[in-house]
Image: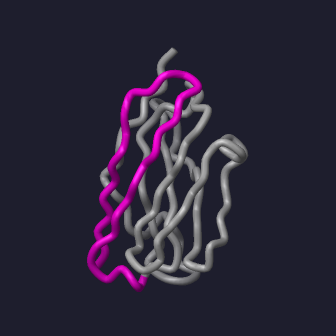
Amino acid sequence: QVQLAESGGDLVQLGGSLRLSCAASGSIFSIPSMGWYRQAPGKQREMVAQITTGGTARYSDAVEGRFTISMDNRKRMVWLQMDNLKAEDTGVYYCAAPKGYGRPWSGGYWGQGTQVTVSS
């Protein structure tokens, strides 16, 4: 089993920056990738960014060029640097990881979430 714990959510002004952190504990070396998802009020949860242990990252179109995901493979820690924040970035951000190679993210490990609010 793996536990994920996020931190770093906050209230930030439009155009500001924020850095989220996520630490994995337990059987961390079973995790092949880690990522961030978010859910805005009244909307479905969506993928924000994912990164593999090999360093390959992918981003949603909504955050490409503004957010950067990074990972410490040895510790299985992942960060999300968010710059030029927009109002539509507001939501609960979840750290996630699949249970193995080729396994679906939806059935993987999830953190409790951390709130990000962008205000004008």
> Foreground: 106 or 19?
19
Dividing the picture into quarters, in which one does residue 5 lie? bottom left
| Segment tinted magenta in the rendering | 1-30
Q: Identify which residue is drawn at 43% across, 45% down.
A: 93
Is residue 16 within the magenta segment?
yes
What is the chief secondary structure element of the magenta stretch?
Answer: strand
Give the image location of residue 7, x and y in percent.
33, 49
In this view of the protein, which residue sits in the foreground, 46 or 19?
Answer: 19
Whether 97 is drawn above or below 62: the answer is: below
Residue at coordinates 66% horizontally, 71% vertically from top-left?
56
Residue 48: in magenta span: no
Screen quadrant of the N terminus: bottom left
Left or right: 49, with 13 as reference point:
right
Tell how many labels: 0
Find residue 53 and report its horizontal and vertical position in percent. 55, 78
Q: For this view, does 100 lie left or right of residue 9? A: right
* Residue at (41, 40) in percent of width and height: 92
Give the residue displayed 44% in from the left and 78% down from the top.
99
Looking at the picture, tell me which residue is in the foreground, 53 or 113: 53
Which is nearer the eye, 88 or 22? 22
Q: Is residue 98 left or right of residue 69?
A: left
Q: Is residue 42 above or below residue 70?
A: above
x and y, in percent, of residue 65 in the image: 71, 45
Position in image of residue 39 (x %, y %)? 47, 41
78 w.r.t. 38: above or below: below
Q: From what the image shows, is residue 31 above or below residue 37? A: below
Colour style of the rendered protein structure:
one colour
